[in-house]
Image: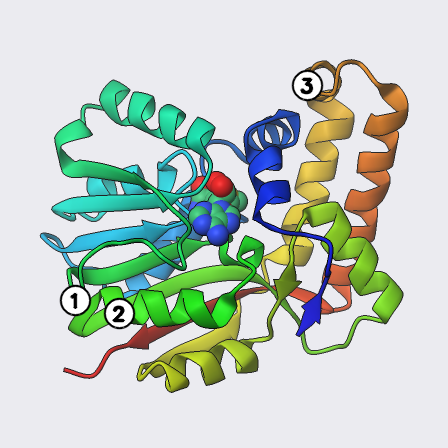
Amino acid sequence: MQRHPDIHLANVQTVYAGPEGRLWELLMGEQIHIGGISSSLDLAERAGIQAGWRGVDLCCCSGAGMRFLLRFRNVAHMTGVDATPAVLQLARQRAADEGVTAATTFIEADVCRTGLPDAAFDFVWGEDAWCYVEEKPALIAEAARLLRPGGVMAFTDWMEGTQPMSAAEAKRYLAFMKFPNILTLAEYTALLERAGCKVQLAHDTARFPRYVPLYLDMIEKQLTYDALKIVGFDQALAASLIGEMRFLHSLAETRRIIQGLIVATKPA
Ligand SMILES: C[S@@+](CC[C@H](N)C(=O)[O-])C[C@H]1O[C@@H](n2cnc3c(N)ncnc32)[C@H](O)[C@@H]1O
C-alpha cells in the first residue's frame, strides 16, 4: 500500500465541492470514472447485476452510476452514500430531472460508517472512488456488512499496479489526486477474504493508459477555454495540471497505476 499521511476526507470533500471536481466532470462527464458507460456495463455484466435488485453505491458522487443501473440494468432501487453535501444536492437534482427520485435514496455519510441496516442490499457498487477512502479495511467490512448472504460486491478503482512506484512518485501522485492511500488487487483481495467474501474476479481493465491521452486531448485541443474558466483563467495552474496529467500517463503506461476491477460474493 502507498499512502500519503497528510491527505484526509476533508481534502477530498474540498475537491468535490469545488473547481477540481468540476474539472473532472468536464473531462469525464457525469460518470466520473475511466471508461464511462462502457466501464459500468462491463462491471455490471461481469458481476451479474440482475433486474429487480436493490443496490448501494458507496461514494456515489452525483449519482450517475445509480441512474445508469436503474436505466440500463433495470435494478429496482439504488441507495447512494457520499460524504460531500454539494455532490448529493446535485445527485438529488439529477435524479429528479431523470424521473428516478422514487427509485433513489441518498445518504450523507462516511462510507466506512453508513448507518444503513445489515444485509439490506443485493449488491454493493463502487466506481473509481474507493481510492479516496482512508480506512480501506473499515470500508470493505462495511460493504460486506451491507450485503445480504449471496449478494455481490462489484467495484473498479484506481489501484497500484504490478510495477512499484518510487516513494517520490507515490507522494506526487497521491498529493495530486488527493488519495490518502491506494491498494493493489492483492491487498483488496486479502481485505475481502478477511471480511468473509469470496473474490470471483480481480484484474487490471487495461483502460488507464488508453484513456489518459483522451483527457489530455480534450483539455488541450477542445475544452481549453472551459477548463481555464473553471480554474479562474489561471494559466500557470492549468499548465501544472496538464503536467500532472502527463505524469499520470507515464505511471499508467508502465503499469505502476491501474484501473482494477473486482467482483466478490458474500457466501449464502
Ligand atoms: C470520483 S467521485 C465518484 C465517482 C462516481 N463513482 C462515478 O462513477 O461517477 C469520488 C466521490 O467519493 C466521495 N468520497 C470520498 N471519500 C469518501 C468517504 N470516506 N465517504 C463517503 N464519500 C466519500 C467524494 O465525496 C466523491 O463524491
In the picture, measured across the screen, residue 30 lies left or right of residue 212, that is left
Q: Nearer the viewer, residue 173 or 243?
A: 173
| Ligand 1 is within 8 Å of the C-beta of the residue at disc 2 | no
Q: Earlier in the sequence, mark 1 or mark 2?
A: 1
Q: Quadrant of residue 20?
A: top right
| Marks 1 and 2 in Cβ contact (< 8 Å) | yes
Q: Earlier in the sequence, mark 3 or mark 2?
A: 2
Mark 1 lies on a secondary structure that is loop
Q: Nearer the viewer, mark 3 or mark 2?
A: 2
Residue 24, x across and y down, in percent: 60, 34
Mark 3 lies on a secondary structure that is helix
Residue type at numbered disc 2: Arg
Residue type at numbered disc 1: Ala
Count residues near mark 1 (Cα–Cα under 10 Å), then give few for <14, some for 14-19, many for 20+.
Answer: some
Residue ID at (18%, 23%)? 99
Residue at the disc numbered 1? 119
Q: By what rule are the colours in the image chosen?
A: rainbow
Q: CA distance from mark 3 to mark 2?
A: 39 Å
Residue at the disc numbered 2? 145
Q: Is residue 128 above or below residue 20?
A: below
In the picture, measured across the screen, residue 226 lies left or right of residue 110, that is right
Q: Nearer the viewer, residue 166 or 48?
A: 166
Numbered mark located on residue 230 in the image: 3
Residue 197, x across and y down, in percent: 31, 81
Residue ID at (61%, 34%)? 14
